[in-house]
Image: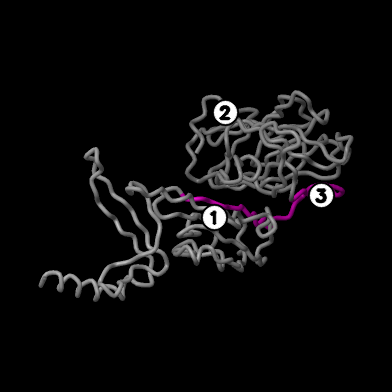
Amino acid sequence: MKLKRHVAAALAAALPAIAGAQVTVNVHWIAPDGAAKTCVVTAGADGVTMDPGGNLELDGVFGGDCPGGSAPMPPVITDGLDLAELPATSAGGAAHTVAWSADADRCSYSASVFPSPVSGWPTSGDACGTAAACASPHSVPVSLPATPGIYAFNLSCWRNGIAAPVVSQRAVAVPGTSACIAPTGLTRATVSYVEFNYTPGNGRETDSTLFENIFGYFDEVSPLRPFPGRSNLNQRVFIAQDMYVSMRFTVPATITPNTSGVLRFEETQPQTDGMSMTISKSCGDFNPIAQAPLTRGCVVNDAGPNGNITWIVGTAHAGICQLVPGETYYLNILHATLDAPLQSLCNRASCGNTIQDQIGPGSPPWP
């Protein structure tokens, strides 16, 4: 009886700390087959309380391995991140309001990846820590920094008793301010329609000023992969008659020497008779003669199917475009010859030819 009074007193003293807060209780028990089990019981927002008879009470949900209980339902993001709130491209300093809510016990922004911190979207701590808080509509004002790059917003939510989170994410590109040198009469396409891996009529609008948005894309939830992108990926980029695409990329400083790749006009049913591509230090560089320090291997003029630019990070080879670790370049694409860049080879409003991003023969694995 004395021991019971001591236990009751200890529990009563502890209750102020656990009442009004979510608490997880691990109940260890032995199943009829002799297996050791742990039943996870998670308290609701009221936590653990004590009734007048000294009995502990909680309202909550069961996790796995509970006798007579059922597994919790997976978390659900009821209002996720979308294009209307976070567009594919946005100017530095632009303000956006992100609305979200979730049927979950905890949510976090911590998996977001930014070139520079985004005001209003912290990448540490929890965005909500109780079911009630996560279910409440959130309206989050964010301001994009001026630093160019890809801002990958991520909302991950968990349910107690379930390990895997549910995820909603959007990638927003903040383009750089480099001036382009394309001939007068041509305009750079900053947002383009792209069809991924032979999916006619099932494409996406994306910021086409950055290489990773085109050749580093796999799906809406996988992180974009910077240069050299994803190997053996086919992307059909649609370009209007009086426009061109110029994709900025930076060669990783830590890339393995002699890594190489091929950007190939991989098309059996081309929508134009040819197209031209250059790799240059300048946006919109359609000079038919490569500008030093780049070489003739960095230019392909009026390429037909299987025409390509082959590049390497390392020792120079004749006909191969040599790139330098840590340096920034532009992949410029035009549906015209470099000798007559204003005479479009496209006979419709816009044309798209498939370009394949291939790993080079004998290249070390891509990062």
- Quarter placement of the N terminus: bottom left
Give the amino acid type for the residue marked by disc 1 in the picture: Asn
Separation of residues labelled 1 and 2 (CA atoms)? 33 Å
Image location of residue 200, percent across then percent down: 74, 33
Residue 251 drawn above or below residue 309 = below
First in sequence: mark 3 or mark 2? 3
Image location of residue 75, percent across then percent down: 49, 52
Image location of residue 275, percent across then percent down: 78, 33
Mark 1 Cα-neighbour bin, 10 Å: few <14, some 14–19, many ≥20: many
> Label 1's element?
strand
Image location of residue 206, percent across then percent down: 70, 48
Q: Which residue is mark 2?
A: 360
Q: Which residue is mark 1?
A: 154
Give the amino acid type for the residue marked by disc 3 in the picture: Thr
Residue 56 drawn above or below residue 206 = below
> Label 3's element?
strand
Mark 3 Cα-neighbour bin, 10 Å: few <14, some 14–19, many ≥20: some
Farthest-out residue, left: 2
Question: Foreground: 356 or 29?
Answer: 29
Which residues, given as a range, are shown in magenta? 165-190
> Label 2's element?
loop
| Dot label at residue 187 | 3
First in sequence: mark 1 or mark 3? 1
